[in-house]
Amino acid sequence: MRILLSNDDGVHSPGLLALYDGLKDLGVLEVVAPDRDHSGASNALTLNRPLTVEQHPNGFRSVDGTPTDCVHLAVNGLFELPFDRVISGINTHANLGDDVIYSGTVAAAMEGRHLGLPAIAVSLVNNGHYHYETAARVVKLLLQQEQPLVLGPRSILNVNVPDVPWNELKGFRVTRLGHRGKAEGAVPVTCPRGKARYWIGAAGVGGDAGEGTDFEAVLEGYVSITPVHVDMTRHEALGTLEEWLEGVR
Amino acid sequence: MRILLSNDDGVHSPGLLALYDGLKDLGVLEVVAPDRDHSGASNALTLNRPLTVEQHPNGFRSVDGTPTDCVHLAVNGLFELPFDRVISGINTHANLGDDVIYSGTVAAAMEGRHLGLPAIAVSLVNNGHYHYETAARVVKLLLQQEQPLVLGPRSILNVNVPDVPWNELKGFRVTRLGHRGKAEGAVPVTCPRGKARYWIGAAGVGGDAGEGTDFEAVLEGYVSITPVHVDMTRHEALGTLEEWLEGVR
Amino acid sequence: MRILLSNDDGVHSPGLLALYDGLKDLGVLEVVAPDRDHSGASNALTLNRPLTVEQHPNGFRSVDGTPTDCVHLAVNGLFELPFDRVISGINTHANLGDDVIYSGTVAAAMEGRHLGLPAIAVSLVNNGHYHYETAARVVKLLLQQEQPLVLGPRSILNVNVPDVPWNELKGFRVTRLGHRGKAEGAVPVTCPRGKARYWIGAAGVGGDAGEGTDFEAVLEGYVSITPVHVDMTRHEALGTLEEWLEGVR
Amino acid sequence: MRILLSNDDGVHSPGLLALYDGLKDLGVLEVVAPDRDHSGASNALTLNRPLTVEQHPNGFRSVDGTPTDCVHLAVNGLFELPFDRVISGINTHANLGDDVIYSGTVAAAMEGRHLGLPAIAVSLVNNGHYHYETAARVVKLLLQQEQPLVLGPRSILNVNVPDVPWNELKGFRVTRLGHRGKAEGAVPVTCPRGKARYWIGAAGVGGDAGEGTDFEAVLEGYVSITPVHVDMTRHEALGTLEEWLEGVR
């Protein structure tokens, strides 16, 4: 099995190293990751400049671009042999609920899926213990399943793992994405040169973190596994929209 | 009606001006857009620095950030009164099929929806004629419908308009997103200082552009309207995934 | 006379427009300026990506790079005919004393000189009145002098103009660069996500703003004109250094 | 002796590690360097956003900014105790002649001098052997001189070291900056999406590389040491300029 690893925390991130160590027995691993932290990069693809790829002494490759750039280049030109899987992570923080829209970790997995490969995004629900090896072992277990997972096309798995030793995990839960509460307001600041600026406010709390959500699962100590689709069409709304448009036509 | 306009081509873009002109009779318009072209920015949110907002002589505001930043700041702090709608565009190029994953235009609309507001992304399927006024009129028509459109939560409309005069439009079609073919391989180049670099390859052609897709609609001269969801959970895969996980637990 | 105009406040800056208006009778003007504010960019040259040049409806060209990039491209490839002069500005704020080391406005002029062309950097010592036309008229006057100015190679003029109507100027003074006092300490801030960051502190006051300096001249209402060199060798220290090195050899 | 080390190749650069190893017996070393390659950044100072400082396992600190930012923050706020020296390097490529105007390595040293500290910029004239230890030993020797070097205020040393083993060095030479020949023209390219772009052309060859220059010294196998000033006034041109201005006043 040839596995492509990427992330959004950058090529020097401890989560990426732990993922590499945890999966190296499964086959050939190649790492192509951003040269620095790109959290929040979402699916941004760099089209206005060519990208530089650098190989590091440990064999990892870094790209001066986004997580999506990394996976795109790796699959579409950097290697002669094709890949079988794309794994993105281990992200240093949770990617729960609406986070997945902005997450570079999830975006790297989506790009893999988009290019035809089964893909998993994995994040540590960090409480400061940094048990990356637990998250790596979760991914290894999923990859070792004999029975193939048929999710349907254009789907990935978004996995969030509590930051505890392996034997303290409560188990695995299939979840839906919850939703964070309303983000806090923008935070105005004045720079030392007197100019007004605004920080994007902190992520909201509350919202939908109830039964069946990924929030609930990790809070209760379970690994959360959510199927996330790459096909953005809201098929179930097609009919409603048709009717509504009658008035226009 | 208070309408927030944004885009990803930047505050000086002709498509944004045309949208403003076309909608100004509908109520109060406020414009908050990136200070330069952010095509391909997707849902990237700027968390590592505060943002600068500048007001231009024409009343438009620009932000030194992404389309998502613009809508987030506008809804979460820049204005006292709340908005009723978010319209993003008019993008200078089509946002069809898989484009929506990377599109900053669509991301701005998604951010609006995410913050609780009905939102539309609108793009011109550009063949060089630049009939922005046609696209603006399409949006105006949609906003003027008496009957409210109930799409369900967490959905937006992605609208692509052929670049022709209004009277040459064939009509409106509700569509699903098609899919582009495999992207072309990365393009290696050598910079004048001898270093190897790679361009992300051009978007693929072919793929699924068949019946019912947005590709087909615009090709045949129709306005394409696709409902796009912001909820990324693949609900229909939850059962399959449950079964599969039995082996793990 | 073919004159290249650039700046560091960006192609849409009012100071650039005023400079264009003020000089347009002198010959053929071409404008190549950054697509957005690049204050503080110094002599940074973009080598890791190719640059995009865009022509605007008013004929101005913008580059997605630094002021130095703009002048470099303009002189080395964008135009068939060579230029006779490079003028950079009108900067919206003073470039006095140590500012010139960091200034993108001065850097654009230095790049012009470096490429063989007489060059002037011009800044408005802004007190909020924005008399750009005064600064433009100062530059025009300098360019219209019949007698050529022989500064020696590798020198430019750094001009700072008080922000007053033309008839309130006290006159012109040849000055040396003063020196700002010690910059204020870095300003620690905590971002909304709890991470510590630091603003570069405000520029220092005091220092050497005494007799003969550019600070003194503008404070007293005069246009300050300082010859600035592009040759960085400290020739007068060569002997001292030779002696000192005896101990090493 | 408390020595601040920085560079423009980034905190992970082998030249920086070699410099640290070479100087660690001289006193307390602190490293504050950019989080990635900032070659060509010149004296750019980041004023439009706060900077993030990160401490690495080896004790080095990285800043998400330019070399000038690093030295500025280190001297103006990150440490309680003051520094005695700033050393910038070891740069992976030569900084000869006009390179110093654009060089981030030299800029870091200039910022140190500007803030009151004796400073040295050191570069390896790289022919692929990467004898960083030779360059580190050169710097150590200079710092160990008993007799203090009085260069006059606002000057730094720009040191270029041939990439050979220590015992193959021919000696030390005090030099003036040479000048590169005219840069090659901008190189037009077309990106995969059909848009025209331009690379800044390669640095010119030829020019003034003659007797007494830094180019000549390193070509002949000597360490080149050039005094470079931070005071940009061209004092010797003040008189000429005065006369010339008579016509204006």
Image: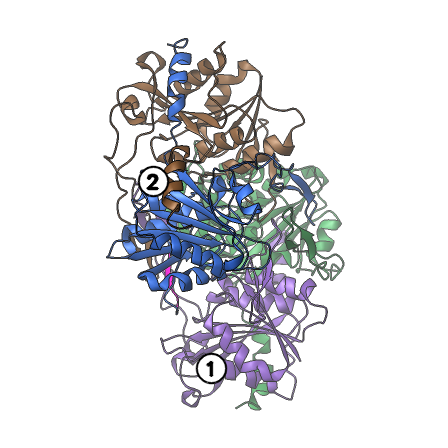
Chain colours: A blue, B brown, C green, D purple
CB contact under 8 Å: marks 1 and 2: no
Left or right relative to C33: residue C174: right
Which one is nearer the viewer's eye here, A59 or D9? A59
Range drawn in magenta? A52-56
Q: Residue at x 24, y 56 (%)?
A: A81
Which one is nearer the viewer's eye here, C156 or C10? C10
Q: Chain of mark 1?
A: D
**x%, y% of residue D189?**
31, 48
Q: Magenta part mainly helix, strand or loop?
A: strand
Pointer 1 residue: D133
Which one is nearer the viewer's eye here, A58 or C26? A58
Give SS at disc 2.
loop
Give SS at disc 1.
helix
Q: Chain of mark 2?
A: A
In the rendered view, tell whether residue D196 sits above or below residue D131: above
Residue B65 shows up from this direction: yes
Pointer 2 residue: A151
| Amino acid type at image mark 2 | Leu
